Amino acid sequence: MTGIWSIIALLFFPGGLFVLTCGLAYEWVDRKLIARFQNRLGPRWFQPAADVLKLLAKEEVVPAGVNPVLFKWLPVIALAGALTAALYVPMAGLPPAFSFPGDLIVALYLLSLLTLCTGLAGANTLDRFSIVGAVRTLTQLFSYEAPFMLALLSPAIVAGSWQTSEIIRSAGGQWILLTQPISFVIALIGLMGKLELPPFDAPEAETEIVAGALTEYSGRGYALFRLGRGVELVVGLTLVAALYMGGLAGPLDFALKTLGLLVVLALFQTLFARLRIDQTVGLWWRYGALLALAQMLVIVGAKVIA
Amino acid sequence: MKIGAMLGDLLRSLFRRPVTERYPFVKRAPPERLRGALRYDPANCSGCMLCMKDCPANALELITIDRKAKKFVMRYHADRCTFCAQCVASCRFKCLNMSNEQYELAALTKAPFTVHYGNESDIQALLDAVAPTNSAPTAKA
Amino acid sequence: MTEQVPNKFIVPIGPQHPALKEPGHFEFSVDGEIVTDASIRLGYVHRGVERGTEDRTWVQNLYLIERICGICSHIHATAYTLGVEKLAGLSAPPRAQAIRELFCELERIHSHLLWIGVAAHEAGFDALFMYSWRDRETVMDLLEELSGNRVHYSCNVLGGVKFDISDAQRDAILRGLDFLEQRTHHYLQVVTQDAAFVRRTRGVGVMTKEQAVEYGAVGPVARASGVERDVRVDAPYLAYEQFPVQMITDTAGDLEARFAVRVRELFESYRVIRAILDKLPAGELMAKMPRKIPPGEAIVRVEAPRGELFYFIKSNGGDKPERVKVRTPSICNFGSVARLTIGHQLADAPMILAGIDPCFSCNDRAVRIKRQDHIQSWTWSDLRRYALKKYSA
Ligand code: SF4
Ligand code: SF4
């Protein structure tokens, strides 16, 4: 794996083009599913791509009072973070492009980069909706991050390794979600929190604070954030599916498992009313964190006994 | 207290046809009473001009070609019409009715919005008379 | 931040904001997420309808008035016709009255279903939004089939109604109502039982009965606080004497109660419509109406979907009214929003706002001038003085 292969991995597969396309496709599936749950037709297949193209073609307005360098580069960093994360997960069911002991942790932090950038982007502008949105984004980050980490770490503890491929190998095709249902649910819901999908969309609640932290973004910057969101959706789904659903044996297995998870995500998105930010925090710390911790203790206990 | 009280609706919809339609490609039959563009039939018109007086949008102009011979031309401004059907209710001779087929009235120019109803020859005479000045509606209620 | 006022973080909502599809301006001062102060400014779409009526004939005004609101169009036209008929000293035949009442109730159904959807959307509950609007199509289609138009039915003429109800249409209405009734039961369950949704509505924006009386709340908002106020019951008009409705009240006074009251009012509407269709009086549809209305003044009160609607009409004997004054329900309820939001989360503010079912086309007739330090309501004579001063130069 030298030179040319790294570049291919970065630009085409599994990073770069492949995840971007995948992100758009998954966004469409998500929107279509939500529409169907709501008895609507939903958008046609090229809609997400058309949205992004349109945004890219638009003028990017840099509002007064922002730090222009930050304003321009935050979306780039966000997208880059999400794309890099794709290198450390078993994209499309193939072994990760790069792998080393502890790559799971790196992937998780790279996934949080997008949220951090969103928060910073909001705090960077003078707009009041953005600031409220940024505060909410970061509040939410602090509430789901710990339980989400704990949940994803439980399989790691069982396997005794921080390396994604190692965890999968040690599970041996077994579905961990059967033995650790609680952390699976928390991981899945944590992913929704991460992606700010309803009902955890208080940070960008349209009816209160317009578009939250990204209110001032338009054109290219907004398109990059959206692409980043799509990529993160794919990476997150891959990670959850790989860890909890017995690894990903190949492209077909990958598609089946992640799309299956996406159906569940879409159902959750339509089923609930938006949580207020205080309710989100309460939910995660009062139930999420405790449950994840309990699950972890059981696992550690079982390991010690064994 | 239930968690996800609408679950049944959501799952059922997955297996049902969506209710929204691809409108310009798929069209539903309009209801019989749909109030679309106005139609005028000069046969019974007495020239009482009640329709014109009652129209809230000044969308009608009744032009008298020959009062004795009961020759009238109705100039109808579809762009002003609010489709309220007051004129239909006001006419005692049932000369007016509203089409339920012609309801997509958007156009790229203003010309299609001015419609003349009446006998062919009368309309032609009228148009010839105004053609040189090419003026928009002159008479007003 | 850019605000001049120190130590205050103000979140402006409107006149362009996705929470409100209509223009109104709200300023919520927040401390963290808690609203500490609220102020309202209305008047962005003042259209001068009242003045406009003075230039049009009695008949033409019917359609201008109908366009005051795009949701409760029929009730405005009905209030106006009732007033003009009163001035002319005649009344529409019984069958026409019953048909008008039928339209009033169909309109209430469509308005309440629309509101459920909007309020659910404010709470981020788009599934309820989509489903209630899907089912609202049933009643919209019925209205279209009956009248030929989905929004401005224009079923009234001075002295009666334009069209009759055929047997086929009667059956269609009954079928539609059966479907809607079953769905409404479901919605009542959803709004009172869905855990996530109830957490956004229960105990939010509580208005006690005393407050409701003090703020002069009307319609479902007042009834949800236990104030028994419904013109249909208190002073029956149209055929409400013959086909009465029951007053629906609740005591909780919170958002959930406002949902429950509106949903339960739907059942009343279904019942009344069935009763009307069952015993539709036979006879004429129109009474002969004079073109000139004798001089005099008339006051009409009717119950619009949002509450009491008031009309004052003055005639000087000509073919045009001398003065038409409209007092719409939303404006009565607005005062409560500013006070109820204080102390709540910012996230609740749009919900409380939506809870009164604000209709901006209803609203924009009051003038409230905001200066740096104080808010002042202008009376008619203040306005007149201001206008004279401004344009005299
Ligand atoms: S339908 Fe109404 S607006 Fe149109 S021409 Fe007739 S009276 Fe005028
Ligand atoms: S009201 Fe009828 S009869 Fe009178 S002018 Fe109009 S169309 Fe002719």
Image: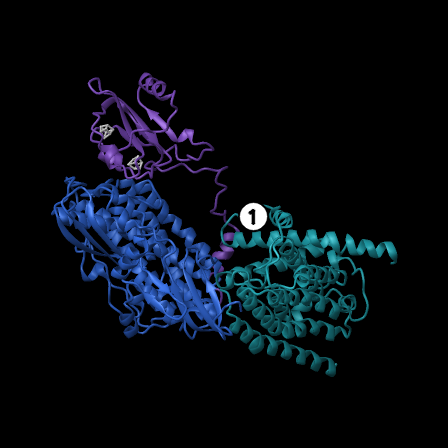
Chain colours: A cyan, B purple, C blue
A296 or A47, which is in the foreground?
A47
Q: Quadrant of residue A7?
A: bottom right
Residue A219 visible in the picture: yes
Chain of the residue displaying label 1: A
Query: Would residue C148 appear left or right of A27 to someone viewing this image?
Result: left
Mark 1 residue element: loop
Q: Quadrant of residue A15?
A: bottom right
Query: Would residue A189 appear left or right of A238 to someone viewing this image?
Result: left
Identified by mark 1, the residue type is: Pro
Residue A117 pos. (x, y %): 66, 65
Up the image or down, B50 lies above or below A268; here it is above
Residue C205 visible in the picture: no
Q: Which residue is mark 1?
A: A43
Residue B80 pos. (x, y %): 35, 36
Q: Quadrant of residue B129?
A: top left
Quadrant containing ligand 2: top left
Query: Would residue C309 appear left or right of C334 to someone viewing this image?
Result: left
Residue A179 pos. (x, y %): 66, 71
Query: Would residue A247 appear left or right of A43 to someone viewing this image?
Result: right
Residue at image coords 81%, 70%: A101
View extreme (right): residue: A2
Q: Residues within 10 Å of mark 1 (few under 14, many from 20)?
A: some
Is the shortest distance between ligand 1 and the CB of mark 1 under 8 Å? Answer: no
